[in-house]
Image (cartoon, rainbow, N blue to C red):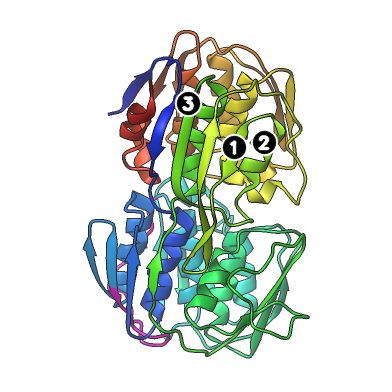
Amino acid sequence: MNTIKIDPVKKIEGTLAVPGDKSISHRAAILGTLAAGETHVANFLTAADCMNTVHACRQLGADIEQAGTSLRIRGCGGLGLKKPSRIIDCGNSGTGVRLLAGVLAGQAFSSVLTGDDQVRRRPMRRIVEPLELMGATIKSRPGYLCPLEIQGRPLHAVHYQVPVASAQVKSCLLLAGLFAEGKTHITLPSLSRDHTERMLAYFGADISRPGNSTPMEAHWAATAKEEVAVQGRTPLQGRKVEVPADISSAAFFMVAAAVLPGSYLRLANVGINPTRTGVVEVLQRMGADIVFGPTRMYSGEPVADIIVKGTRSLRGRPICGEDLIPRLIDELPILAVAAAAAEGETVIEDAAELRVKETDRIGALAEELRKIGIEVEERPDGMVIQGGEIRGGQADSHGDHRLAMSLAIAGLFSEDGVEILHADCVKTSFPGFWECLQSVSA
């Protein structure tokens, strides 16, 4: 399915279970590989990105059996990984490259990490430099681009200040810190996703926040500035992991239901980690009727049903700030679509990180939104969107899964529908997206 046309609908209704969280699935596979004993993972995301991480873990010696969305991982233990016999290809997953680089930096062998054309254009300097400070030797293409040739070495702990609020960089260094002598301290200028810290604690790592004398609990509260430390050479133990539904995947349907009057949608068992709920906060500020059901815990992660009613007109609001943008960076494309359907002007700022995602998401998104009749002013770190009616027409995903799904949602409340070129890319993060969309469209 390379081209698909999404026609307008009257409302969205029903109950939907979106796939497992992409970020948590990556980490479950990697930590299960590093742990002693068996790890059982339920609701694993079987999209292309996460399956490439599974393939990489198998190359490193993990015995992984898959049955649908369940994995059984017989781990290697921290120093039990084996040298891969070929290059590790992470496909379209920058997360896979960056997390695995942290693991491989501390091994007693050399390895090579690469990915597809999009990943080979993504910047890796932000992980290469701190890993080299810890003692690793890494070669890359000019510009710190993949492939990364990693010569693993005995690592030493560092105190490192990450210049941008990047969960991938933080996670890379935490994983490297598992193999380092001493305690690795990492500071970020603002909050970022904390799935790695939560799962490390769940698997038995000695991980803490400086200034707090107790080990970090799985439900610790989000704070504006991040400081985290991990003690090296602490063994991990295999666990049972239940992966919540992905709030980034749920966000597309939240916007659809919020915009279309008369809609009622329940999204089941969605992860509501406070470092990921920025999209809900923004939609609520815009006037969306969104509430959480009772909260429960899945393997250290808070989970709840999310209920959305399409009963109000949305209003444009500013989307900016270093305390907010890292908590919704992946949801900005669909929030731009919500802004296009809202009354008034929405200004998105402080989001320059979108320039170095699978595509230049600022440039590509602005270009494609204009094609379907939306007034957009592109800025270096964001855009200004004038809300109103969406005419529709033909648009190109640029091979970017989040852009493709955002354009599909725009088609639901456009005048003439939206035809999306290169629509197959949604399999990167959301296999079954088109079927889910059809199931709740009325």
Question: What residue is drawn where x is 43% and y is 14%?
Answer: 8
Tally of numbered tags: 3
- Is disc 2 surrounded by few (<14), some (14 to 19) or many (20+) residues within 10 Å? some
- Magenta includes 397? no
The disc at residue 290 is 1
Q: Is the magenta stretch mostly helix, strand or loop?
A: loop
Q: Height in image: 240 above or below 346?
A: below
- Is disc 1 surrounded by few (<14), some (14 to 19) or many (20+) residues within 10 Å? some
Whole-angstrom CA distance, mark 1 to mark 2, is: 7 Å
**Left or right: 90 as drawn, with respect to 319:** left
Q: Height in image: 251 above or below 245?
A: above
Instruction: Please tell me whether mark 1 sits on a helix, a strand or a loop.
Output: strand
Question: What residue is drawn where x is 31% and y is 28%?
Answer: 2
User: Which residues make up the magenta segment?
Assistant: 73-91
Q: Height in image: 416 above or below 119?
A: above
Kind of residue indicated by mark 1: Ile
Can you identify the residue that label 3 sits on?
409
Q: Quadrant of the N terminus?
A: top left
Can you identify the residue that label 2 sits on?
284
Kind of residue indicated by mark 3: Ile
Q: Looking at the image, do the residues carrying marks 1 and 2 touch, with CB atoms under 8 Å apart? A: yes
Instruction: Please tell me whether mark 3 sits on a helix, a strand or a loop.
Output: helix
Question: What residue is drawn where x is 68% and y is 29%?
Answer: 287
- Magenta includes 81? yes
**Left or right: 77 as drawn, with respect to 62:** right
Instruction: Please tell me whether mark 2 sits on a helix, a strand or a loop.
Output: helix
- Is disc 3 surrounded by few (<14), some (14 to 19) or many (20+) residues within 10 Å? many
**Left or right: 248 as drawn, with respect to 422:** right
